[in-house]
Amino acid sequence: MYCVRKVTDDLYWVGANDRRLTLFENIHPIPRGVSYNSYLLLDEKTVLFDTVDWSAGRQFLENIEHVLNGRKLDYLLINHMEPDHGASIEEVLLRYPEAQVISTEKAFMLMHQFNFNVDGRTIQVAEGDTFSFGKHEVTFVSAPMVHWPEAMVTYDLTNGVLFAADAFGSFGSLDGRLFNDEVNFDRDWIDDARRYYTNIVGKYGPHVQALLKKASTVDIKMICPLHGPVWRNDFAYFIDKYDKWSRYEPEEKGVLIAYASMYGNTESAVNALATKLAERGMTNIAMYDVSKTHVSQLISETFRLSHLVLASVTYNLGIYPPMHNFLMDMKALHVQNRIVAVMESGSWAPKSGSLMTEFLDEELKTMTVLNEQVSVLSSMNESSALEMDQMVEGILESMND
Ligand SMILES: Cc1cc2nc3c(=O)[nH]c(=O)nc-3n(C[C@H](O)[C@H](O)[C@H](O)COP(=O)(O)O)c2cc1C
Ligand SMILES: [Fe+2]
Ligand SMILES: [Fe+2]
């Protein structure tokens, strides 16, 4: 059964959802699934904007056939070649033998690498070029590293629709509701959108800033991303999030407490710390056990909040592996400008505190590590309790800066 939605008078969403996939890119959990959005324009010419992952191919092809309603497909416009969007290109070309592919030089190179036969059917475009489909004229804007080097976005000069590729996307499948104003985005979607952005594109903040700058020069009436809801109003809300995330600026003053504990003593210490913070009025607290929380969630929360408490047991003279993994992921994604408090524990040679501090100082250079640190010898005692009180003061003082 086809499943499509009208986006404008002559533009249709013809994408599909995948609720079965457990891990996006085989690494990020997606309990709410993911949508692969594709759009079909019925102008004097017919134009398909991007395709979908192979897993959603059957639904997608049925949708296209329904919307075309006997018309031929004239153009397939490819903004992004990652296989979650590009995988169905060849099948579309087989079914619609007259379709020509509009894309960039880099994207055609990738099509060649992926072994898609587009010979004799390519129309190469570059930033600033325009192309008319009849009533609609579009222009192309390169968006390198948002999220791959070949990525571009396409802006419809006629009606202000921005085909944004991976930008402004989100994890989560669509449940019939397509537009941002049909869902409660701030309640039901923002966490998935943040986890998507921070883990997928988070590393490329300056590239996203460059795209936002280009986008600010045009009058956007609608944003059609390749994942998640379509935006038709309230752009400032989402653009502001993207602006903050891509500048590595926290959304909120608050404390993320990420702890690593085997037998509960370190956990007990951070419970005490969180309680003291709350008693002092700092109630924006999010606490996670790094062993039980996927690192993509820890990364997302790190982008949201201004402060970070890292509390780790010492493990074979090292940092507990899941905590180490979190630190390495922060480095990989270029997380910046957070205030970090470090707590260690150990029973005979506590080392995790100095090792975490060293990692933060040397590998994550823009982090501010508070001088107030806590060292727990097996369990809290008078000395570590005093250190904890000082850490609480240090965190609260740095909040006011
Ligand atoms: C496999 C293993 C390796 C450990 N290695 C160290 C170590 O190198 N240095 C140290 O001081 N404590 C080490 N410990 C002890 C724990 O870090 C210490 O008991 C800590 O207080 C446990 O806190 P928890 O109750 O939050 O799990 C190790 C414990 C285990 C199980
Ligand atoms: Fe992508
Ligand atoms: Fe994607």
Image: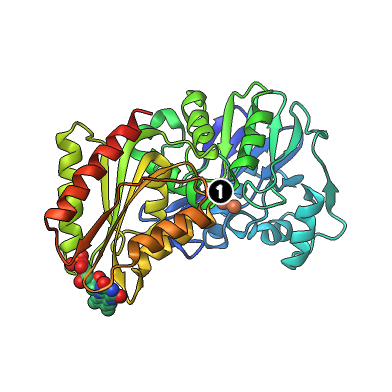
Q: Residue at x 78, y 54 (%)?
A: 106
Say what secondary structure mark 1 lies in: loop
Instruction: Specify the quadrant of the image occupied by residue 278.
Output: top left
Q: Is residue 338 above or below residue 324?
A: above
Neighbor class of circle 1 (other Cα within 10 Å; few <14, some 14-19, many 20+) is many
Figure colour scheme: rainbow
Q: Position of residue 373 (x, y in %)?
A: 29, 51
Tell me which amino acid carries mark 1.
Val
Quadrant where the image shows the C terminus = top left
Give the residue at x 26% y 44%: 391
Q: Is residue 172 in view?
A: no
- Left or right of 42, for residue 338: left
Residue drawn at 34 percent across, 74 percent down: 317
Q: Nearer the viewer, residue 54 or 332?
A: 332
Residue 97, placed above or below residue 135? below
Residue 236 is situated, as x and y percent measured from the top left of the image, at 50, 24
Residue matched to label 1: 201
Judging depth in this view, the residue of 355 and 13 nearest the camera is: 355
Work out whether 139 lies above or below 62.
above
Tell me residue 205's x, y (percent).
Answer: 58, 42
- How far across and how far down the image is residue 264, in percent? 16, 64
